[in-house]
Amino acid sequence: METFEKAMRLTRICRMLYQDFKRNKYLRTSERFISCTSIRCDDVLSSGRSTKVTEDRDPLPLFMSEEVQTWLQKMTGFDIEKICAPRPFEADKPTYRLLTNDELEKEKKKAIQIAKRRIQMPPVMKMRDGTSKVLQKDPDLNMFSKAKHVFTDISFGLKDRKRFIVVREPDGTLRTATDKEHDRLNQIYNPQQGRAPVMPRMFEEEYLEKTLEKGQYRYILDRACVQFDPDNPDFIRVAHRTYEAVCERHMFDVLRSTRHFGPMAFYFAWYKKIEPLLADMVQRDLLSDAVDLIKLYFKIHQELSSTVVLEENIDELHIIKNFCEKMVKNPNYKGQLQLAIQAYEAALTSQAKRSQSKQIN
Amino acid sequence: MAARLLNVSRMALQQFSILAKVASEDSILYKTAILRCCQGINNKCFLQSVRQITFINTQTSGSIWKSVTGVSNVGKKRGRARGSRRFVDLNKNRRLGEGQKGMQWPGLNAPIISRREGRVANKIQVLPPNPQKQEELIKLREQSMKKRARNKIPPLQRGWTGNKLPGTSIGYPDPVEDYTFEGFDTRVLEFKRVATMTGTLGRISRFSAFVVTGNGNGLAGYAIGKAPNGRSALRKAMNRAAQHLIYVDRYENRTVFHNFYIAFHKTRLFVEKKEQGYGLVCHRALKTICQKIGIQDLYCKVEGSSKNIQALTKAFFEGLQRQETHQELADRLSLHVIEYRPEMDNIPRVVATPMSNVREKREEGEEEVDFETLYYDGRLPLKKPKQKPFYFNYQSFRRKLKQDYRYRNQPDALQLRIVHGLQPDYEVNRPKPKPKMKQ
């Protein structure tokens, strides 16, 4: 009801504007917090592709649950040099200080806070519903202008996602803005640093593939985080494609200690493709991470949870082996995972032998 | 004379004209033709004398060129000869006596006895025609006309300015016993003529070369060499520089450890440590030296004399050697040396920790050491703010700034529009011309 009243108020203002326009031949805003924009090349701007929603479940509550967050954070790791790795902008003059032990400890604590902010995971969300609602049809206003008129609520303190934006079509229809229009107008009134008003071409499929070939996964994901909201279909498309590319080349380590590792692991668990990541973890002697990943897998797909026993006191390698036997059906993936487990076991035995011989000596 | 010529019989005239046609191009044959003709008419007629000697064939080609393009000596001094055409030698590659026909005259343009055909005397004869002869001649003449091209030096090995030696590369030093100076390169820093007065010989001048040699990886040396010959002075200096190599410790193999001040004679240097990618912003001689040492990022301000290259070099090398590494500094003050890099979110990165006795706490009221000016020896370089142009406060310029203000983002926006294909095509949107009124 509230939105409807708001829309009606806007319609009234629109009418007043129209009369004003007729009288004075130019537009004048009647209320301070309402501003009016006309858009001409709208058709060009709004022509973008969208991927189809395949999954109806909303992953956000699961992703945000405390348990899942702790697992994902543990998996990500915390290498401060990598979290704060030099960004691709021009370097500036470094500063130097000479500090005592106490001061250094304090500085290190501050650095950890900075790194923690840097490593916050972008939420995994369901694709947003970008359709617009028709609020009113006013045939009297037909052809009052050649351009669409967009009305934006620019009251102080409003959040971008909650901002009310409506469009008066030239044929007199008043409707809420589509998501693309919403994003663009928000960017016009409240510009966010680094976000382009139109989607950069590097996210178009053709150019995205080229960038992926170069292996700039972190750069793509970082820029996508700046450019899009996490429920933007384009963000989901770009992120998923990048995770796939990382998986194809087994470059998981590139994303460790970055904010994208958690969402990536969550994506693999969500779509039941955790095997390559699992094999990578076993190879790198990160068994507890592997077990966490398996736990996450069963947390998401609770209907399968009875097949593998996940208890604290059971050996980690045993859980992984069990998972490999019971859950992995793709022979390719299975072979990969088995090989990794065998190599790990071989390494363990050789290590044991070495330590034994040392003791004897 | 004309009346007498009329008496010449038709036959004789015809004979003459045929001969004359054949021989018109060659003056010797021409003369013989006239003689034969005269014999043919039994000395009954006189011919008009032909003027064989003209201005053209008496003067040398040089004097003819000069008469056309010559400029007086006074004119030359005033630069009038600058645009004149260069002398073209039209007789280039022509052989004497050969003529258009290609005659062979033994003793003049051919040996009297031919060597090829078993020592037989050569005959006076017309050689077989060579249709490409004329083209070949023209080609040869054009070739000789062309200026000889100077061999190009690659841009990175050219000097600092013009065709001067300083800044140029002169290769690597000569090997000493088994050691070859591989990877070394030598650059000239100063090259000049110096003189001394002696009691017996008077003024004796020599060349003085001041060079720096280095492998671009910390090892470098400089030296001066003098010799009466420029080239040997350079060699002497280069080889001597190779004997005086110094190892320069660098931070991350790219810059100095800290800012420092150093002076030699009237030359004072303020050297600044810089971030990666900054480049070498300093005196050209220092830039060359840095390249040879392997320093990539540095700023240096020279105060006092910047023309005395030798003092500059000595000061710089002295300053580099006096540097204190971070480890040494940490040990000296018993404090951690911490680096903050803006591109890394200014997180503290420990560069050096003291080997022993780290200080736990700072005393009350104790100030932190300023790393920036720690090695400036109590001085500071003069840093002038950038001067505004003289017209900055003019009303007209203010007006212009005001007018431009609203278009300040347009160049960037235009570029963005073009990238996204949103820039409307000018041809499409151009306003249509108004139809002309019929009269």
Image: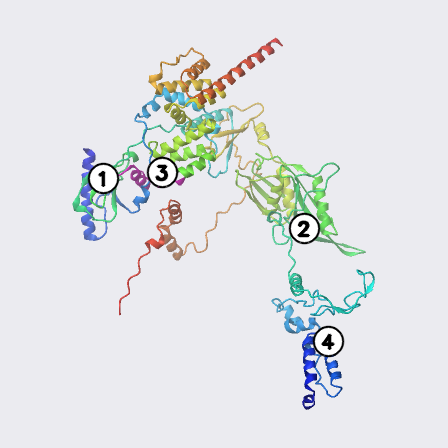
In the image, the segment drawn in magenta is A177-201
Chain under disc 4: B
Badge 1 amino acid: Arg
From the viewer's side, name the closer residue of A304 and B124: B124
Task: Quote the CA–CA distance across marks 1 and 2.
Answer: 80 Å
Locate the C terminus of chain A and report the quarter of the image it occupies: top right
Badge 2 amino acid: Phe
Q: Which residue is mark 2?
A: B191
Q: Where's residue A44, x and y in %? A: 32, 44
Query: Could you say whether the residue bearing mark 3 is in a helix, strand or loop?
Result: loop
Q: Which residue is mark 3?
A: A192
Q: Are marks 2 and 4 in contact (CB under 8 Å)?
A: no
Q: Are marks 4 and 1 in contact (CB under 8 Å)?
A: no
Task: Quote the CA–CA distance across marks 3 and 1.
Answer: 26 Å
From the viewer's side, name the closer residue of B10 and B139: B10
Query: Could you say whether the residue bearing mark 2 is in a helix, strand or loop?
Result: strand
Disc 2 or disc 4, which is closer to the eye?
Answer: 4
Say which mark, if any, is on residue A175: 1
Q: Where's residue B207, x and y in %? A: 72, 51
Task: Quote the CA–CA distance across marks 2 and 4.
Answer: 66 Å
Badge 3 amino acid: Gln
Is the residue at mark 4 from the same chain as the one at mark 1?
no
Disc 3 or disc 4, which is closer to the eye?
Answer: 4
Say which mark, if any, is on residue B334: none
Q: Are marks 3 and 4 in contact (CB under 8 Å)?
A: no
Is the residue at mark 2 from the same chain as the one at mark 4?
yes
Q: Which residue is mark 4?
A: B29
Q: Are marks 1 and 2 in contact (CB under 8 Å)?
A: no
Locate the N terminus of chain A and report the quarter of the image it occupies: top left
Chain under disc 2: B
From the viewer's side, name the closer residue of B31 and A330: B31
